[in-house]
Image (cartoon, rainbow, N blue to C red):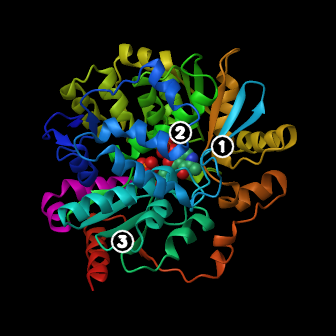
Amino acid sequence: MRYLSTRGHAPVRSFSDVLLAGLADDGGLYMPESWPQFSADEWRAMRGLPYPELAARVIAPFAEGSISYETLLELCRDAYARFDHAAIVPLVQVEDGLFVQELFHGPTLAFKDMAMQLLGRLFDHVLTERDERVTIVGATSGDTGSAAIEACRGRDRLTVVILHPEGRTSEVQRRQMTTVLDANIANIAVEGTFDDCQDLVKAMFADAPFRTEMRLSAVNSINWARIAAQIPYYVYSALALGAPDREVSFAVPTGNFGNVLAAWAARQMGLPIRRLCVGSNRNDILTRFLNANDMSTREVAPSLSPSMDIQVSSNFERLLFELLNRDAAACERLMTGFRATGKMDVPDEVWSSARELFSGLALDDQATETEIQRLHRESLYLADPHSAIGVAAGRKYREAGCPTVAMATAHPAKFPDAMRAAIGVIPALPPALADLYEREERYRVVPNRLDVVEDAVRIGALHNAR
Ligand SMILES: Cc1ncc(COP(=O)(O)O)c(C=O)c1O
Ligand SMILES: N[C@@H](CCOP(=O)(O)O)C(=O)O
């Protein structure tokens, strides 16, 4: 499979090249040249497969020409061996027609492990083949960072530098990152928001001499491999609930638009998905877009679901590109205008086609708490604030006869304060993290300035080289 940029100026590249490049040279995001298709019989043949095998089958066409199916299968088996649930991505029914798919059984207790455990291994595989090293820079609002660190720690071909917004993650999330003291890991707390961190990452990529000097790579969902590795769990639950012989809808708590974009990609591949329901917190740009074609940024406000405190959802560009019939020039115009003004004038026909598939619901903190209480009371289900937002979106938009699956994206133990406030219960951290609060932390706080952050990345890489 070959990949092209949503902005149209970068060279077409292979899967392995895209994995290592992360962001395209022209600032765009890579997209597959075409969508792999599975027939109804091929979907049916995947029903009941162990998750690693299903994942390898679904991802294989995206990696074609770069990584063989056999290698992919081996990497998937290894990646998901560390999950603490035999089903890897279990489905739990919470109401008639409404299910939760738990994506938090990996080592860092969030859905990011689903892709990141595989990505760490893919990086190692490709870099060993090429005898190369890279410096990964990532931005996190709380979960991507620890998942990337956990997947890449101790791998000597990788240096990982993660930027998080100072004081805007939960303490558990911060400690999961900053207590990892391996030489190839560095943590930077930026005085700003997640959007500032994401902008800094993109600015480092746009600084061509720095990008080349450091051999930069990305693990955020700007990297296509992240999206590809998030598609299989949609396939898994859809098949379990009757696809391809029955339609299924998904509800996804959304920030950077990567997770729901993976569901959309599954639909592009022929999986019968009826509706995609997007849940937001008070940082509700996506819901405002879907409801009123209002794609304008506002100040980021802290919420009970800090991982979704995001205004600029980077993967929206991929959907836009597709809905513009892959007109890269139009996509670039809209994205550049958005960057300059904080507002995107999405053409009405693009908005209408987005609404044919996507629905949005925003919950403020009070409504999120109410949803956590309701799930606890009526379904004996403990949902973290992010997952609760997804379930609420699923309930609002579900249709009779079409099962709806809400993505549970984080373990409630990651957000003890929110859980205690909502239901008076602090879920226990798993044994591997039981001493998290006693571990030594290491990170530096820096202002939101590109030159300072670039220096900190250089220092992180130097530290690893020693
Ligand atoms: C727990 C949790 N839920 C939901 C989201 C939103 O996912 P996405 O950014 O892929 O839309 C995130 C962060 O991305 C997260 O960490
Ligand atoms: N919520 C995310 C934000 C980054 O998202 P990504 O999917 O683009 O890596 C986080 O937890 O860091």
Report the span colored magenta: 198-214
Q: Main secondary structure of the magenta part?
A: helix
| Disc on res. 233 | 2
Kindly identify the residue that appears in the image at 60 percent across and 45 percent down.
89
If the image is split into quadrants, where does the C terminus sit? bottom left
First reached walking from the N terminus: tag 2 or tag 3: 3
State whether residue 275 is above or below residue 459. above
Say which element carries label 2: helix
Q: Amino acid at mark 2?
A: Tyr
Real-space Cα separation, disc 2 to disc 1, in angstroms: 10 Å
Along the line of sight, the residue nearer the viewer: 293 or 440 = 440
| Left or right of 93 in this view: 235 | left
Tags 3 and 1 touching, CB below 8 Å: no
Q: Is mark 1 within 8 Å of ligand 1?
A: no
Please identify the quarter of the rendering in which residue 371 is found: top right
Query: How many numbered badges does the structure rendering display?
Result: 3
Q: Position of residue 397 (x, y in %)?
A: 65, 22
Q: Which residue is mark 3?
A: 155
- How packed mark 2 is, by other alpha carbons closer than 10 Å (few <14, some 14-19, many 20 or more), is many
- How packed mark 3 is, by other alpha carbons closer than 10 Å (few <14, some 14-19, many 20 or more), is some
Along the line of sight, the residue nearer the viewer: 423 or 89 = 89
Q: Amino acid at mark 3?
A: Arg
**Does residue 309 show up?**
no
| Left or right of 219 in this view: 366 | right
Kindly identify the residue that appears in the image at 20 percent across and 43 percent down.
14
Kindly identify the residue that appears in the image at 59 percent across and 47 percent down.
103
State whether residue 442 is above or below residue 57. below
Please identify the quarter of the rendering in which residue 353 is found: top left
Q: Which residue is mark 1?
A: 90
Q: Amino acid at mark 1?
A: Pro
